[in-house]
Amino acid sequence: MISVTRLDLQDAGILIEGAAAKAGEIGVPMCIAIADEGGNLIAFSRMDGGKVTSSTIAIDKAFTAAAARKATHDYGAASQPGAPAYGIASAIGGRLMVVGGGLPVVAHGEVVGGIGVSSGTPDQDRAVAQAGIDAFLKQI
């Protein structure tokens, strides 16, 4: 039997609130998605002004970060021509994201979920995702 630690809806709310606060601070309305450790969507928020096209991207970033237990920007680097994971972006029906903004959520040394953010630049998305994680880690 396996025991699994995963994010719940309350945790997802903390992650979204922390990310949204950072998005407000930098002036970029974002789409923010939270997934459990298996990549299943727990919660999603599109801030007023967040790009409609970024909704699916944020969800897939959270999926990738959680299920693959790897930051999406790390896949970006590894998926370039000549790199070891070249072509991986087409895996899983194209759901595997290789653009920054998806981070695994780690608690007590274990991946418990993922956060995906989209609507800004990859660096902005990544900073907003990290702010969500920082807010969550203050609560545990």
Image (spheres, rainbow, N blue to C red):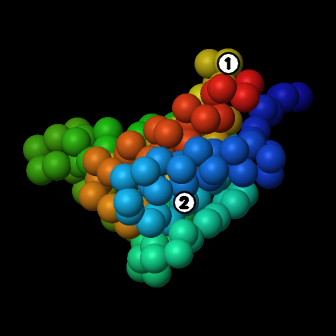
Looking at the figure, which quarter contains the N terminus? top right
How crowded pointer 2 is (Cα within 10 Å; few <14, some 14-19, many 20+) is rated as many
11 over 122 or under it: above or below: above
**Residue with the mark numbered 1:** 108
Q: Is residue 51 visible?
A: yes
Mark 2 or mark 1, which is nearer the start of the sequence? 2
> 118 and 131: which one is in front?
131
**Horizontal and vertical percent position of residue 47:** 54, 69
**Horizontal and vertical percent position of residue 7:** 74, 42
**Residue with the mark numbered 2:** 32
> 58 and 136: which one is in front?
136
Amino acid tagged 1: His
Looking at the figure, which quarter contains the C terminus? top right
**Horizontal and vertical percent position of residue 139:** 72, 29
Q: Give the residue at x 54% y 54%.
A: 20
Q: Give the residue at x 37% y 53%.
A: 26
Query: Residue lying farthest left?
Result: 82
| CA–CA distance in space, label 1 to label 2 | 23 Å
Amino acid tagged 2: Ile
In which quadrant of the rendered view does residue 41 lie?
bottom right
Question: Taking 92 as reference, is 10 left or right?
Answer: right
Question: Taking 57 as reference, is 105 left or right?
Answer: right
The secondary structure type at the circle numbered 1 is loop
**Horizontal and vertical percent position of residue 40:** 68, 57
Q: Is the Cβ of the residue at disc 1 closer than 8 Å to that at disc 2?
A: no
Q: Give the residue at x 11% y 44%.
A: 82
